């Protein structure tokens, strides 16, 4: 094999290997998601594109390992996106590390997070707290057992939210305010894991 052919073969191998690693880490977008305009909010390696509330640089309770965001517990800081979003669709996976758990998913929240939370506490999963949304409710019956991966999908358009849990429509709500804000994950004293965070902005 010529030197040029060897280089091309090696490049193809490395590209394939990179794709396999990304897929194994759960960060690879499907062709359908790419066509719809989704982007990955988590690269599987570090917190690029994210920040910690309270301007904390490197907290002990958050880390990335094996392509997963790992939260060991603690009540702060929370993990927030570096930028604000208005209308969007967000998809992500989460699971508890233990049978008892507590966390939250913030949408259009303030800089330090706190408002507009979809609850991730055991028994109250999917309930909307820290704001007023008509039609929101807990959807524990759609959740998988503790320690298994769950997939959540949230579509925010204007004042309307549509929420799916594990591919099933959970509820549709209205009254979401403000018109834009930060997305984030809550530290609420429990060990949790997150992966495959994907988002598309809705124009």
Image (cartoon, rainbow, N blue to C red):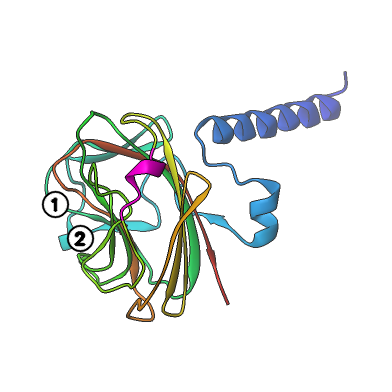
Count residues near mark 1 (Cα–Cα under 10 Å), then give few for <14, some for 14-19, many for 20+: some
Residue under the point 29% across and 57% down: 127
The correct choice, above or below, for 60 with respect to 6 in the image is: below
The correct choice, above or below, for 10 with respect to 156 in the image is: above
Residue under the point 20% across and 60% down: 53
Determine whether label 2 and label 1 are within 8 Å by CB: yes
Name the side, left or right, on which 198 lies relative to 71: right
As rendered, which of 33 and 143 lies closer to the eye? 143
Q: Which mark is residue 150?
A: none
Residue 168: x and y in percent read: 51, 49
Residue 129: x and y in percent read: 23, 63
Q: Which residue is mark 2?
A: 53
Q: Give the CA separation, mark 2 to mark 1.
A: 8 Å
Quadrant assignment for the C terminus: bottom right
Labels in figure, total: 2
Residue 152: x and y in percent read: 44, 49
Q: Is residue 124 magenta?
A: no
Q: Is residue 142 magenta?
A: yes
Q: Could you say which quadrant of the image residue 39 lies in? A: bottom right
Q: Could you say which quadrant of the image residue 130 lies in? A: bottom left
Which structural element holds mark 1? Answer: loop
Residue under the point 17% across and 53% down: 77
Work out whether mark 2 precedes mark 1 in sequence or the reverse, and give the earlier one. 2
Q: Residue furthest top?
A: 1
Name the side, left or right, on which 12 lies relative to 33: right
Which structural element holds mark 2? Answer: helix
The correct choice, above or below, for 38 with respect to 174 in the image is: above
Q: Could you say which quadrant of the image residue 142 lies in? A: top left
Q: Which residue is mark 1?
A: 76
Quadrant assignment for the N terminus: top right
Please state the extent of the stretch shown in magenta in the rendering: 138-143
């Amino acid at each position: 094999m010529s030197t040029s052919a060897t280089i091309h073969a090696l490049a193809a191998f490395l590209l394939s290997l990179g794709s396999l690693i990304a897929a194994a880490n759960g960060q690879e977008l499907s062709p359908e998601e790419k066509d719809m305009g989704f982007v990955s909010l988590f690269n599987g390696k570090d917190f690029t594109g994210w920040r910690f509330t309270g301007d904390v640089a490197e907290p002990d309770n958050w880390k990335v390992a094996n392509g997963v965001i790992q939260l060991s517990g603690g009540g702060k800081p929370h993990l927030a996106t570096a930028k604000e979003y208005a209308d969007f669709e967000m998809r992500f996976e989460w699971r508890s590390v233990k049978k008892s758990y507590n966390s939250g998913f913030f949408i259009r929240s303030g800089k330090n997070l706190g408002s507009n939370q979809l609850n991730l506490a055991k028994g109250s999963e999917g309930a909307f707290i820290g704001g007023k949304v008509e039609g929101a409710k807990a959807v524990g019956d759609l959740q998988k057992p503790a320690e298994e991966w769950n997939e959540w999908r949230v579509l925010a358009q204007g004042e309307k939210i549509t929420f799916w849990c594990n591919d099933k429509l959970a509820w549709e709500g209205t009254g979401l305010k403000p018109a834009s804000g930060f997305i984030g994950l809550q530290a609420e004293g429990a060990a949790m894991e997150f992966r495959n965070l994907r988002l598309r902005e809705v124009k």
